[in-house]
Image (cartoon, rainbow, N blue to C red):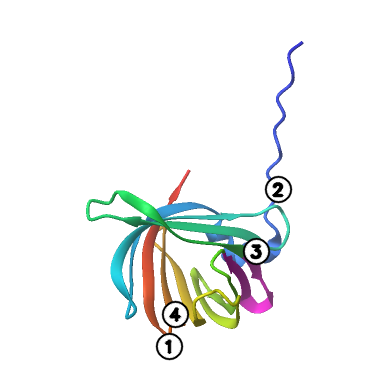
Amino acid sequence: MEQPEIHAAVPELHPDLEPIAFLVGRWEGAGVGGYPTIESFNFGQEVVFEHNGKPFLSYTSRTWLLDDEGNKVRPLATETGFWRAQKDRQIEVLLSHPTGIVEIYVGEVVFHKIELRTDVVARTESAKEYTAGHRLYGLVEGDLMYAFDMAAMGQQLQSHTSAHLKKVG
């Protein structure tokens, strides 16, 4: 006997998420990074924003080092968490890193621009020193662009990475 196909209904986006609805989906692209304590590098990235009908977006980002020809060399950073839209276009972002760092960002959404600053940074004993972050995301002609500044390893807040991502799928 043939089994019927089961299709899971896609939940409706929670109305609180309207200001950040443009993020939903899978994004891929490339970026550049550097910092006074490391050599400059090129990286590839995949970012996924998903929802289940509740008032938050699930978030996953993974990056990998690219060689001069754009080929994957090895994995780099991974982070996962939740983006929570608040009243008056405010936003809270909770991120966790396998390197022993957890961050809570607070910020604001203005049209298709999101600016975030760390409110809390917690580190395990074995994690590298990291004390603050500032992230700027924007939708530019349908692409997701972002810049990430950090304060780490005794350095003041300064540019670390930026990327240009295109929506896929």
Residue type indicated by callout 1:
Gly
Q: In this view, does 103 lie to the left or right of 63?
A: right
Residue 50: image x %, image y %?
A: 61, 53
Q: Mark 4 points at which residue?
A: 150
Q: What element carries label 4?
A: strand
Q: How crowded is mark 3: few (under 14 residues within 10 Å), some or many (20 or more)?
A: many
The first of marks 2 and 4 along the sequence is: 2
Report how far apart the C-alphas of labels 3 and 4 lie in the structure.
27 Å
Report how far apart the C-alphas of labels 3 and 1 lie in the structure.
37 Å
Q: Which residue is drawn at 38% across and 75% down?
A: 160
Report how far apart the C-alphas of labels 1 and 2 lie in the structure.
45 Å
User: On the image, which quarter does residue 21 sit in?
Assistant: bottom right
Residue in front for this viewpoint, 95 or 85 = 95
Of badges 2 and 4, nearer the viewer stands 4
Instruction: Name the main secondary structure of what is drawn in magenta.
Output: strand
Residue 108: image x %, image y %?
A: 57, 78
User: Is the C-beta separation of discs 2 and 3 under 8 Å?
Assistant: no
Residue type indicated by callout 2:
Pro
The first of marks 1 and 2 along the sequence is: 2
Q: Is mark 3 on a helix, strand or loop?
A: helix
Report how far apart the C-alphas of labels 2 and 4 lie in the structure.
36 Å
* Numbered-mark total: 4
The first of marks 2 and 3 along the sequence is: 2
Q: What element carries label 2?
A: loop
Q: Name the residue under label 3.
A: 17
User: Is the C-beta separation of discs 4 and 1 under 8 Å?
Assistant: no
Q: Which residue is drawn at 47% across and 75% down?
A: 135
Magenta residues span 82-97
Residue 11 image label:
2
Residue 44: image x %, image y %?
A: 37, 56
Find out whether residue 74 is within the magenta segment.
Answer: no
The first of marks 3 and 1 along the sequence is: 3
